[in-house]
């Protein structure tokens, strides 16, 4: 597809003014389905069908490039695009039809479709005062150009990508992923990860699974967090071990504004010789939700902490010995809900639970007392 423009007489007069220093002010760009006759003397584009979006012009020397975008998504009726009209402000006459572009191949613009056309309009002023306006075909994004990207965005069946790596390389791998996930990433980890890991801002039709082949194959000694993710995130057979010298308030796992499934994982704090505990298990806040299935919790200062809408479900068939040595089981603060499976101890191996305001712990359909209010 090629497109070439012609100035109107008033447009040529305005171009002469800009050549000696006046500012060219484009007021609008429109698309039409007609055929402008006698362009030099035209004052309006016939059969205007829509107004296009105009971006900021980029200027270099005596050339200005104007990006223009046509989108069909909000159109009420289908039409055939045959020409474009650029209107500009003349300092003496006000708005004028500046130039008209004609397409050598008409394009059907389907109302409500996801068709997007992008034009880059380049203006060149000749030394003798003449002018010609051209739009390079390379500056046009057609339906065929958009199709591969649209296919990725609208995909409903994402392919699977299996990756194996040392846990120490996980953050670098996550940082290199696009935020728009169009694949189901299954990442098998091994070894020890001593740095904090952050999973943040992923969306799309894909998913993330972080796993180990066996519990103990991958050990985190710092925190992991999942934040602002709309893709499903799953953790399987991962182990957290808070070591001596770690900040006592360190959480093994944070979750905010995301939904997270955790299966067959282990969370262990540090038990000091004087009986004190360092390290906390799971922290859920900002309307996040976590399901913990068949997980173990040992020697933690607090097993589960929620606030501002955090929801936690704890279930599974693991034995009570998987909940031991903890100080506080559930700590609910300013809004939180914890649901316990029938085989889960009421205080998760801790001495008591605590709750504050709009909070609840429910097991087998009944509210559980906190031990402290």
Image (cartoon, rainbow, N blue to C red):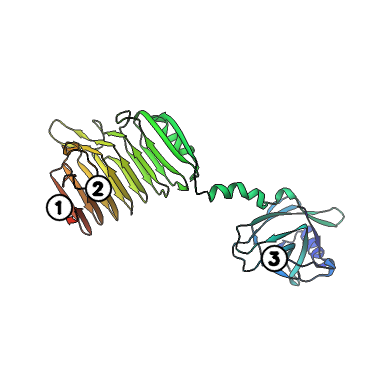
Q: Earlier in the sequence, mark 3 or mark 1?
A: 3
- Count the marks: 3
Q: Earlier in the sequence, mark 2 or mark 1?
A: 2
- Badge 1: residue crowd in 10 Å (few <14, some 14–19, many ≥20): some
Where is residue 131 drawn, in percent x and y?
83, 57
Relative depth, front residue between 346 and 132: 346
Relative depth, front residue between 225 and 344: 344
Could you say which disc has been placed on residue 370 in the image?
Answer: 1
Q: Residue at x 69, y 68 (%)?
A: 49
Residue 30 visible to the viewer: no
Where is residue 317 drawn, in percent x and y?
22, 41
Q: Secondary structure at mark 3?
A: strand
Look at the picture and state if 264 lies above or below 38.
above
Q: Earlier in the sequence, mark 3 or mark 2?
A: 3
Where, by quadrant of the figure, is residue 220 drawn?
Answer: top left
Q: Name the residue beneath numbered marker 3.
A: 79
Q: Residue at x 24, y 42 (%)?
A: 316
Relative depth, front residue between 7 and 239: 239
Q: Secondary structure at mark 1?
A: loop
Where, by quadrant of the figure, is residue 324 drawn?
Answer: top left
Label 1 near label 2: C-beta < 8 Å? no
Q: Residue at x 63, y 64 (%)?
A: 111
Q: Name the residue beneath numbered marker 2.
A: 305
Relative depth, front residue between 172 and 77: 77
């Amino acid at each position: 597809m090629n497109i070439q423009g012609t100035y109107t007489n008033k447009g040529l007069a305005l171009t002469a003014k800009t050549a000696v220093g006046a500012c060219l002010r484009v007021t609008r760009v429109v698309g039409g389905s007609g055929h402008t006759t006698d362009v030099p003397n035209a004052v309006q584009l016939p059969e205007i069908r829509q107004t296009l979006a105009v971006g900021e012009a980029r200027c270099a020397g005596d050339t200005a490039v104007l990006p223009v975008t046509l989108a069909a998504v909000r159109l009420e009726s289908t039409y055939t695009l045959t020409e474009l009209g650029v209107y500009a402000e003349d300092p003496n006459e006000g708005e004028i039809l500046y130039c008209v572009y004609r397409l050598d191949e008409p394009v059907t613009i389907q109302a409500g479709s996801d068709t997007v056309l992008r034009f880059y309009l380049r203006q060149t002023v000749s030394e003798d005062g003449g002018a010609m306006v051209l739009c390079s075909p390379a500056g046009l994004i057609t339906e065929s150009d958009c199709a591969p990207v649209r296919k990725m965005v609208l995909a409903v069946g994402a392919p699977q990508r299996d990756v194996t790596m040392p846990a120490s390389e996980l953050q670098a791998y996550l940082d290199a992923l696009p935020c728009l996930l169009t694949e189901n990433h299954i990442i098998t980890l091994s070894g020890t990860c001593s740095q904090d890991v952050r999973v943040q801002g992923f969306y799309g039709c894909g998913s993330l699974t972080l796993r180990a082949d066996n519990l103990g194959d991958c050990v985190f000694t710092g925190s992991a967090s999942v934040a602002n993710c709309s893709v499903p995130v799953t953790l399987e057979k991962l182990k957290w071990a808070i070591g001596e010298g770690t900040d006592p308030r360190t959480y093994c796992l944070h979750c905010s504004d995301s939904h997270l499934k955790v299966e067959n994982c282990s969370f262990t704090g540090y038990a000091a010789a004087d009986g004190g505990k360092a390290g906390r298990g799971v922290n859920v806040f900002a309307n996040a939700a976590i399901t913990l299935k068949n997980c173990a919790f040992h020697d933690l200062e607090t097993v589960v902490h929620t606030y501002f809408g955090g929801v936690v479900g704890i279930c599974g068939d693991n034995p009570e010995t998987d909940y031991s040595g903890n100080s506080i089981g559930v700590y609910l603060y300013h809004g939180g809900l914890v649901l316990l499976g029938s085989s889960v101890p009421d205080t998760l191996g801790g001495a008591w639970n605590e709750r504050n305001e709009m909070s609840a712990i429910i097991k087998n359909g009944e509210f559980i007392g906190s031990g402290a209010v």
